[in-house]
Image (cartoon, grey):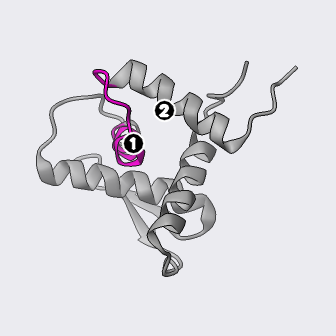
């Protein structure tokens, strides 16, 4: 039987597990999790990234996370293997709190698709 999770329970579980695995004690926040998703989506494993590459990884993750919402669509991989997305619909103007909620929901949906919350 599958447990019914609240959004807060899922978020707390996710941050706890990812912090244990990928952080050295400091709890991962939304940006840290977005960065990890970017590394995952690049598909080249973890390595030391330059500052501009880190920003690109976060952009990849945001595009991937918002793709199911109809804001982005995968376009192509460049010659270095980095994914590129095209804008389908402009993002609405959201207040910072609304942005955070949207990103948390998208992150949870991403991890649900990976069957992360199964018992």
Q: Residue at x 52, y 76 (%)?
A: 88
Residue extending farthest left: 50
CB under 8 Å between discs 2 and 1: yes
Q: Is residue 80 left or right of residue 65?
A: left
Badge 2 is on which residue? 15
**Residue 83 visible in image:** no
Left or right side of 60 for 64: right
Q: Which of disc 1 and disc 2 is earlier in sequence?
A: 2
Q: Is residue 25 magenta?
A: yes
Q: Residues within 10 Å of mark 1 (few under 14, many from 20)?
A: few
Residue under label 1, please give it: 29
Q: Is residue 48 above or below residue 83?
A: above
Q: Secondary structure at mark 1?
A: loop
Where residue 101 appears, x then y in whole percent?
A: 56, 58
The residue drawn where x is 39% and y is 42% is 29
Q: Look at the image and give the residue range highlighted in magenta.
A: 23-39
Q: Quadrant of the C terminus?
A: top right
User: Can residue 95 be seen at all in this image of the molecule?
Assistant: yes
Question: How far across and down, in percent of the image, does residue 18 sit?
Answer: 44, 27
Q: Is residue 94 left or right of residue 31?
A: right
**Residue at 66% across, 29% down:** 115
Which of the pair 66/92 is nearer the observer?
92
Residue at 43 percent across and 57 percent down: it is 62
In the image, residue 36 lies at what x, y percent? 37, 38
Residue 16, label in figure: none
- The quarter of the picture where the N terminus appears is top right
How busy is the neighbourhood of tag 2: few (under 14 within 10 Å), some, or many (20 plus)?
some
Looking at the rendered structure, the secondary structure element under dot 2 is: helix
Count of numbered labels shown in the rendering:
2
């Amino acid at each position: 039987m599958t447990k019914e999770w609240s959004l807060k329970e899922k978020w707390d579980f996710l941050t706890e597990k990812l912090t244990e695995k990928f952080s050295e004690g400091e709890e991962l926040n939304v940006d840290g999790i977005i960065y990890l998703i970017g590394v995952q989506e690049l598909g080249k494993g973890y390595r030391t990234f330059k500052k501009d590459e880190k920003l690109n990884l976060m952009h990849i993750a945001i595009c991937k996370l918002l793709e199911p919402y109809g804001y982005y669509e995968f376009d192509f991989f460049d010659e270095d293997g980095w994914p590129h997305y095209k804008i389908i619909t402009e993002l609405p103007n959201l207040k910072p709190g609304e942005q955070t909620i949207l990103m948390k929901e998208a992150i949870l949906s991403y991890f649900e698709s990976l069957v992360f919350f199964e018992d």
